[in-house]
Amino acid sequence: MTAAKFTIQVELVCQDASLRKATEIGGANVWSMPISYRGQRCYRVFWGRYETRDKAEAATTQIPASLRSSKPVVVTIPQQ
C-alpha cells in the first residue's frame, strides 16, 4: 500500500475550543498539527489522509459544511 501523501487543510485555529469543535464535527477524519502563527500557538486542522492529490480533491465534497467555510485546500502532509 502506498503511504498517504496528501491531506485537506480545512482551517487554522488558535483557540483550543475551535480545535475541539472541529474534532467533534469531523471525528476520526480530523487531525491537526501545532504551528506558531503571529507569535501564538495555533493548529493547522486537516481532513483525512490520501495517497494522491486527485483522491484528496475528490474528498473535499465529504467535508461537512461547517468545516468548509475557510475554503479547504489540498496540501502535502507536513513533516513533523
Image (cartoon, rainbow, N blue to C red):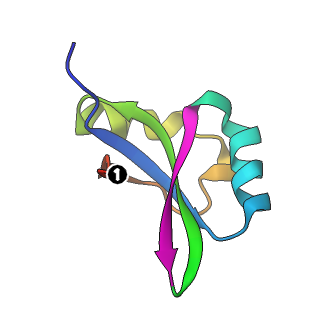
Q: Which residue is mark 1?
A: 80
Please give the name of the residue rendered at 62% of the width and 60% of the height, measured from the top-left corner.
69
Q: Is residue 68 above or below residue 24?
A: below
Of all residues, the one furthest to the front in this rendering is 80
- Examine the residues drawn in magenta and state their main secondary structure: strand
* Spot occupied by residue 73 in the image (x, y as percentages of width and height): 40, 55
Of all residues, the one furthest to the top in this rendering is 1
Task: Answer with left or right where residue 70 lies relative to residue 7.
Answer: right
Please give the name of the residue rendered at 64% of the width and 51% of the height, measured from the top-left corner.
67
Decide whether residue 33 is among the magenta residues: yes
Q: Element at badge 1? A: loop
In the image, which residues are magenta? 29-37
Please give the name of the residue rendered at 58% of the width and 69% of the height, measured from the top-left corner.
42
* Spot occupied by residue 52 in the image (x, y as percentages of width and height): 23, 32
Q: Is residue 44 above or below residue 39?
A: above
* Spot occupied by residue 71 in the image (x, y as percentages of width and height): 50, 61
**Quadrant in the rendering for residue 19:** bottom right
Q: Is residue 63 above or below residue 1?
A: below
Decide whether residue 20 is among the magenta residues: no
Of all residues, the one furthest to the bottom in this rendering is 38
Instruction: Name the residue nearer the viewer: 71 or 17.
Output: 17
Q: Is residue 69 above or below residue 3?
A: below
Task: Answer with left or right where residue 5 lies relative to residue 63.
Answer: left
**Quadrant in the rendering for residue 55:** top left
Instruction: Name the residue nearer the viewer: 66 or 77.
Output: 77
Residue type for callout 1:
Gln
Please give the name of the residue rendered at 24% of the width and 25% of the height, measured from the top-left corner.
3
Instruction: Give neighbour class at mark 1: few <14, some 14-19, many 20+ (Cα, 10 Å).
Output: few
**How many labels sit on residues?**
1
Quadrant in which the N terminus is drawn: top left
Task: Answer with left or right where residue 20 lies relative to residue 71.
Answer: right
